[in-house]
Image: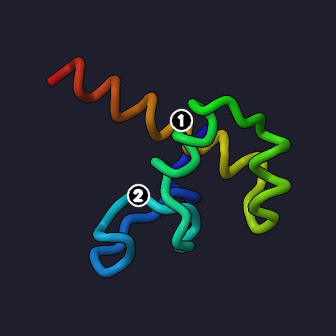
Amino acid sequence: MDYRDIITIEAGKRSGKACIRGMRITVIDVLEYLASGMTHNEILAEFPELTEDDIRACLAYAADRERKLVLA
């Protein structure tokens, strides 16, 4: 998945953290929900503005960042 169409970073929004489609929901928020045990369906029910692709984009973004850290 190419997360670059979904994950946005804006200096004035959420202190420059990676957000989903310019909203105030960050990648970190979604990853923390998943890590706490929430399912994709639970996240989508709690945040109806999100899509399954948004959640997958967060995972792809995190995987890409991790890959870049290992290669650095």
Identify the residue at the far top of this view. Answer: 70
Quadrant holding the C terminus: top left
What residue does disc 1 label? 60
Q: Quadrant of residue 68?
A: top left
Q: CA–CA distance between discs 1 and 2?
A: 12 Å
Q: Residues within 10 Å of mark 2 (few under 14, many from 20)?
A: many
The number of callouts visible is 2
**Which residue is more in the foreground, 42 or 20?**
42
Check disc 2 and report its element: helix, strand or loop.
strand
Task: Tell me residue 7's x, y (percent).
Answer: 50, 57
In the image, residue 39 sits, relative to residue 24, either above or below, namely above
Task: Tell me residue 22's x, y (percent).
Answer: 52, 73
Residue drawn at x 66%, y 45% as measured from the top left: 55
Question: In the rendered view, does 70 fall on the left or right side of 59?
Answer: left
Residue drawn at x 56%, y 61% as measured from the top left: 20
Identify the residue at the far front of this view. Answer: 36
Residue drawn at x 75%, y 62% as measured from the top left: 47
**Which residue is more in the foreground, 72 or 42?**
42
**Which label was assigned to residue 18?**
2
**Which label was assigned to residue 23?**
none
Mark 1 and mark 2 lie on one chain; the one further toward the N terminus is 2
Q: Amino acid at mark 2?
A: Ala
Question: In the rendered view, does 37 fall on the left or right side of 65?
Answer: right
Check disc 1 and report its element: helix, strand or loop.
helix
Residue drawn at x 28%, y 75% as measured from the top left: 11
In the image, residue 69 sits, relative to residue 14, either above or below, namely above
Q: Amino acid at mark 1?
A: Ala
